[in-house]
Image: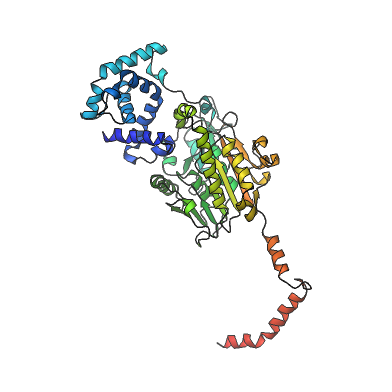
């Protein structure tokens, strides 16, 4: 029964909003992941139907001493009705289900007749139709490979380089026009079993999810110091590492232990040598800590509603979310957290660039958060403003919503992706930059001088006089 208990725990965590379906599945042990994930997904597809059957049969009421977990009951009933039987040894929980086998099958047939369906598949929840229009995006991991080599590899596999989505037989592919080293394939193409995916040369990542790292534009030099504040599962982290060409130091924070394990696995697979994964909450980090005080670039992709995701498994939860009366409260709490983490990032003394992104389409998590940050003490004290549009993926046409901004002109500095029109999931990206410090430093130096002195006048004379007076000392030091 352990297999069933693991699946039930995933459903429990989903109900508690502790993560996405994909994210929680990624935390399962490797040896059980494929089997457990299949059961979780299939159960969710039929959850409304199964719940109705369980209620109509009064199963949990009559077996309340044995069946104490609604989600475990849901999973076992799924296998009884839709998967050829419960795959576990006899025990009190299994027997409690089997005692009602006839009644459960009877309720199942009555439901099919009532809904006028002939197959079980017709009862399953249907995926968002927009997902079928989103290409399969494949990013070349330049830590291990190059785009030209990847193209040769794709061709050797029978693909043909052509326009987006390619040919009628789905074997065409194209280089993405906005993101370097990203390729588009037909949505039905899978790379899960491809050797280049398994060994880390290829990374499956939605196009919009690639925007934050490109917009952050981390430096590729040995002295670079960068933070990815919320790293798991690691796609954006590996992208940052590749853009940094493996140079400098990239601190990757993840507070959840299970997700941190997933992050470590991903980074090892992608051979990201300049990354220091840290199992800690970014919000607990002291910005003045010498280890992080020289960080200049910070990527923030915190928890959000996920309302923009249409080609992921979480469509199976949408019906529940829509009926959730606390949805507005949830969005407000998420927005408060998002504001908090941006403010914290702005406290790092050397940070010059902070990118904030969500996979949400709600303005409350996007434009409203940006507006609140721009008025905050942290932004004003640190001299932060929005990066101009020419620094924020200028070739991308869809921008922020002016009517959701206090300053409508700021919308041009924001990036949005529409699942309806852009061939991506819904996404939002903003970039805060610290205003140029050099001019203020120069002014500060000038104000320290007497009013009748300038940098070109007596100050230069003082330097010359000092050098003349140091002649003897120079000789004596040489003698040592």
| Residue 301 visible within the image | no
- Identify which residue is drawn at 49% across, 41% down: 303
Quarter of the picture containing the N terminus is top left
> Where 196 falls versus 95 (above or below)?
below
Furthest toward the right, the residue is 452
Residue 394 relative to residue 191: left or right: right
Quarter of the picture containing the C terminus is bottom right
Looking at the image, which is closer to me, 324 or 33? Answer: 324
Where in the figure is residue 235, as x and y percent of width and height?
48, 43
Residue 115 relative to residue 431: left or right: left
Where in the figure is residue 46, as x and y percent of width and height?
39, 23
> Where 476 falls versus 406 (above or below)?
below
| Residue 322 visible within the image | yes
Q: Quadrant of residue 426?
A: top right
> Where 456 falls versus 355 (above or below)?
below
**Total numbered circles:** 0
Looking at the image, which is closer to me, 218 or 101? Answer: 101
Where in the figure is residue 60, as x and y percent of width and height?
30, 25
Where in the figure is residue 144, as x and y percent of width and height?
48, 48
What's the image's color scheme? rainbow
- Identify which residue is drawn at 37% across, 34% down: 12
Looking at the image, which is closer to me, 407 or 420? Answer: 407
């Amino acid at each position: 029964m352990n297999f069933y208990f693991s699946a039930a725990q995933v459903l429990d965590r989903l109900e508690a909003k502790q993560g996405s379906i994909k994210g929680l599945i990624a935390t399962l042990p490797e040896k059980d992941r494929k089997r457990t994930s299949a059961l979780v997904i299939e159960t969710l597809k039929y959850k409304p139907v199964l719940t109705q059957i369980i209620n109509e049969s009064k199963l949990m009421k009559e077996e309340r001493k044995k069946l104490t977990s609604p989600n475990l009951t849901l999973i076992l009933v799924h296998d009884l009705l839709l998967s050829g039987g419960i795959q576990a040894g006899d025990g009190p929980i299994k027997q409690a289900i089997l005692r009602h086998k006839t009644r459960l099958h009877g309720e199942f047939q009555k439901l099919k007749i009532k809904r006028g369906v002939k197959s079980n598949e017709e009862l399953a929840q249907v995926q968002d139709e927009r997902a079928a229009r989103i290409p399969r995006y494949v990013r070349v991991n330049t830590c291990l490979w190059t785009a030209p080599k990847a193209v040769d590899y794709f061709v050797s596999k029978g693909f043909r380089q052509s326009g987006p989505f390619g040919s009628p037989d789905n074997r065409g592919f194209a280089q993405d026009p906005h993101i370097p080293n990203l390729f588009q394939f037909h949505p039905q193409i899978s790379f899960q079993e491809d050797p280049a995916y398994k060994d880390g040369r290829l990374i499956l990542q939605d196009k919009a999810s690639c925007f934050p790292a490109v917009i952050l534009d981390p430096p590729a030099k040995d002295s670079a110091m960068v933070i990815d504040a919320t790293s798991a599962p690691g796609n954006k982290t590996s992208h940052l590492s590749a853009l940094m060409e493996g140079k400098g130091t990239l601190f990757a924070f993840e507070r959840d232990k299970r997700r941190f394990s997933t992050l470590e696995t991903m980074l090892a697979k992608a051979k990201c040598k300049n990354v220091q994964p840290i199992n800690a909450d970014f919000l607990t980090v002291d910005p003045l800590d010498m280890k992080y005080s020289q960080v200049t670039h910070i990527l923030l992709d915190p928890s959000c509603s996920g309302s923009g995701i249409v080609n992921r498994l979480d469509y199976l939860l949408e019906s529940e979310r829509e009926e959730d009366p606390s949805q507005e409260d949830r969005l407000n709490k998420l927005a408060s957290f998002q504001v908090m983490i941006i403010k914290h990032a702005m406290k790092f003394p050397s940070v010059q660039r902070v990118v904030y992104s969500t996979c949400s389409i709600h303005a409350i998590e996007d434009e409203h958060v940006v507006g609140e940050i721009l008025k905050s003490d942290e932004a004003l004290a640190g001299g932060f403003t929005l990066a101009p549009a020419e620094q924020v993926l200028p070739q991308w046409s869809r921008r922020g919503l002016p009517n959701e901004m206090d300053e409508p002109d700021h919308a041009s500095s924001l990036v949005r992706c529409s699942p309806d029109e852009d061939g991506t999931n819904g996404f939002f990206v903003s970039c805060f930059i610290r205003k140029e410090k050099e001019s203020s430093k120069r002014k500060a130096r000038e104000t320290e001088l007497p009013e009748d002195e300038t940098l070109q006048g007596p100050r230069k004379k003082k330097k010359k006089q000092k050098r003349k007076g140091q002649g003897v000392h120079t000789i004596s030091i040489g003698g040592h």
